[in-house]
Amino acid sequence: MEKKQLDWSNLGFGYIQTEARFVSNYRDGAWDDGAIVTDANITLNECAGVFQYAQTIFEGLKAYTTEDGHIVCFRPDLNASRMADSARRLEMPAFPEERFVDAVVQVVKENAAYVPPFGSGATLYIRPYMMGTNPVIGVKPADEYMFRIFVTPVGPYFKGGAKPLTIKVSDFDRAAPNGTGHIKAGLNYAMSLHAIVRAHEEGYAENMYLDPQTRTKVEETGGANFIFITKDGGLVTPKSNSILPSITRRSLVYVAKHYLGMEVEEREVYLDEVKDFAECGLCGTAAVISPVGKIVDHGEEICLPSGMDEMGPATKKLYDTLTGIQMGKLEAPEGWIRTIL
């Protein structure tokens, strides 16, 4: 299989249209068989539920070329499960989890020429999503839905290495108590756009959102979970009902315990204790871990001992171990790697 003639080592993190995508429609109470199609465009009625009441959810995962030349995907079953949870919360019909994984495999196979070669630093980003498609004018769930998956080759999230970021404590709330913060709904990300634009205008890379009820506990950023490293080398991750359950975070917790022998705590993390941590990172599909060097809380600077020059040593071990598993350099736990080709 011949690869596309792309400048793999200089790809940005953006959309490049590929030839094939998967589409399945839900009508009359059932999902159809679905199919691989070539048309990247979608035609919907002006009153479609997705336009009127933001009934849309999505996932994000990646396919990689391993050191031995195989194309693999990392833990797609967890994306399938999380998307089903998101669907149920928005009164959407869950796309069957086994079919989700099969559809991911189909799309990656059809676009194998776009999977970047090993060592390029690039990957194939996979975006499954679902939306309400029939006209809805009263406030209620749609009756018909479309599930789709497209893929796009992307470069590393950070060019030239992951330099520690400066972030700010946000005055905005990302999610409400007992709301939708724990699911991957488009509306959650729409809520964060104003806050991230403001942060960028002020010179910050991201926001730190606090719990909306007391505004004393760390939650997450607009698109990533937090991890903290204690001064004695332990891993701490915030726990909350309104945090999205990150698959990357879940995997890092396992790696920390079982590969690196670290003490791990999943608990409430208070803003006033952040100054006592040695390292901080944002974890998610796009960058795996983005190190944080400084957090600014309304003018007060919290500077992490790991500094602003490079990723901290414990965070680097976590990053190298997880990416080593993803790329086939290290043996993976059973069920983590789905070989596609």
Image (cartoon, rainbow, N blue to C red):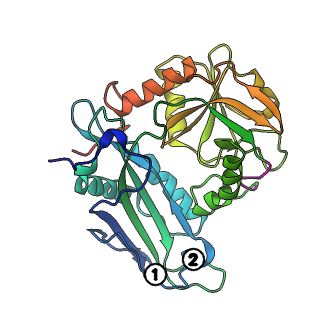
Residue 81 placement (x, y as % from top left): 47, 52
Assign the magenta stretch its main secondary structure: loop
Residue interval drawn in magenta: 171-176
Left or right: where 268 falls relative to 187: right
Q: Is residue 180 visible?
A: no
Crowding near pointer 2: few (<14 within 10 Å), some, many (20+)? some
Location of residue 25 with respect to 187 vertically, above or below: below
Residue 128 placement (x, y as % from top left): 42, 59
Residue 32 placement (x, y as % from top left): 34, 74
Residue 78 placement (x, y as % from top left): 45, 47
Which of 324 and 303 lies nearest the eye of the viewer?
303
First of labels 2, 1 by sequence position:
1
Give the number of the disc on residue 44: 1
Query: Looking at this rendering, what residue extends furthest in the left direction?
Result: 1
Which of 60 and 251 lies nearest the eye of the viewer?
60
The answer to if 174 sits in the magenta stretch is yes
Q: Is residue 99 visible?
A: yes
Q: Which residue is mark 2?
A: 51
Give the number of the disc on residue 278: none
